[in-house]
Amino acid sequence: MPPITDNTVHKTEKKSHFFLLLNTIGTKSISGGIGIIIDSKNDKKPRSFTEFLFSDNLIVFCIILKIYFFMITLIFKIFKNVFFSIFLFVNISIADNSRLTLNEILPGIFLYSGKNVQPNSLNQGSIANKIAVEGEKYILVFDTGPSKKFAKKFINELRKFSKKPIKYVVISHRHFDHAFGIEAYIEEKSIIFMDKNEFNYFKKEGPAINKLLINNLGFDRDNINFDSINKEKITFIVNNTEIDLGNRKILIKNLGRAHTLGDIVSYDYKTNTYLTGDLIFTGRAAAFSDADIPLWIEAIEKKLDKPWKFIIPGHGEIIKNTSKIKDTKSWLYFIDKAIKKSALQGDMISEIFEYSIPHDIQHLKMKKLTLRQGLKRQMYLYKKKYIE
Ligand SMILES: [Zn+2]
């Protein structure tokens, strides 16, 4: 601390580096450089040491506090950014490396259980159920999943249970969450069953839908390559056929128009189990944009004519008694009635959202979203086919 004498107190235009630094970071309150001990009202009058100590040092102290605050805020911001980058990276890594789980839910039936959620960049569309059935010689896979990558993971996981060849693959319908893993099974040289109309639409609409999945939902760019998929690699199934996996017969049946233009189901005689694809949903509202709703209701009521003990639906939990089929049937009744009512009353789509939802389907997930996706198209189809 310099001694306070007349000789040491003089006004200087030269400002210290410290002062300039303070100005740079926005400190406007200091008047004068550090070390200038003058009275602001009277330049000639030196101030007392006490005044200097408690006034100027207080200002310096406040400035130092402000610098500390600035530094702490800066460090906090850097820390926050680093933390979120790590979080994002870990999340992506988890999504990417997450092993897919298969459970043997019935003897020789392995299930990947999709969650009733919307497709997004983390789940990459793996929201539907996929099943493998093992006989003494061969394996049948029912539905391929949303991408080649998913199908490869499914096969890797399946290999922990069985090394038998995947001789047959059934693609229940064309929707991405069931069909876009097809390439992995073309590489396996499996016999792939699909409905012909569904395959044609899959080839026609598929690339545009894939683009939407990539651009809007953040799916991987190498999801699927439609160029490598042609009709020579598909066995079209018109009515039904029976295959033998080695002491295990499976019926593969095309139910025709229902959820899509051609819904294919399979029936395992050994465990009396139906694999239905999206003919049946549990726990969530069934997607109906590509459906013929009256024919769909009829298919559920009349075409699951084998004595079944279990139904593995396209989405949701395995069904062990008929009451659970109501999740799909009651939902379809509701939509059927709602569309007819709206046509009769001249109601708009927004007004259908106001219709009261029956008690037995109130528990279903994703009702609003599913209505939003399907109503416009269905109103058009109903007008053409069932109303006019
Ligand atoms: Zn579907």
Image (tube, helix red, strand yellow):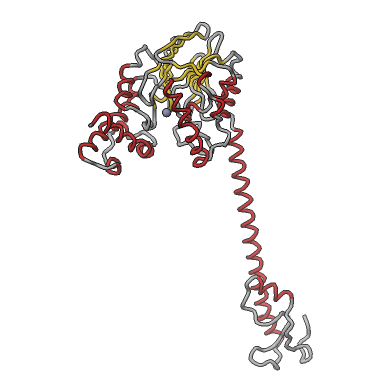
Q: In the rendered image of this protein, does residue 289 appear above or below residue 349?
A: above
Does 296 sit left or right of 227 as displayed?
left
- The residue at the far top in this view is 247
Does 124 sit left or right of 266 as displayed?
right
Which residue is rendered at x = 76% and y = 92% of the image? Answer: 6
Query: Residue 17, image x and y in percent?
Result: 74, 75
Which residue is rendered at x = 65% and y = 73% of the image? Answer: 63
- Residue 253, quarter of picture: top left
- Residue 159, quarter of picture: top right
Q: How many marks?
A: 0
Looking at the rendered image, the quarter that the C terminus falls into is: top left
Front one among 234 and 334: 234
Query: Residue 98, image x and y in percent?
Result: 59, 32
Query: Residue 68, image x and y in percent?
Result: 66, 66
Does 260 sit left or right of 56 as displayed?
left
Q: In the rendered image of this protein, does residue 265 appear above or below residue 32?
A: above
Front one among 382 and 156: 382
Front one among 167 and 377: 377
Does 15 sit left or right of 302 as displayed?
right
- The residue at the far left in this view is 345
- Residue 89, quarter of picture: top right
Query: Residue 156, image x and y in percent?
Result: 61, 23
Quadrant observed for ligand 1 in the rendered image: top left
Regarding residue 130, the answer to whether it shows in the image is: yes
Which residue is rendered at x = 64% and y = 55% of the image? Answer: 78
Q: In the rendered image of this protein, does residue 180 appear above or below residue 270?
A: below
Looking at the rendered image, the quarter that the N terminus falls into is: bottom right
Regarding residue 100, the answer to whether it shows in the image is: no
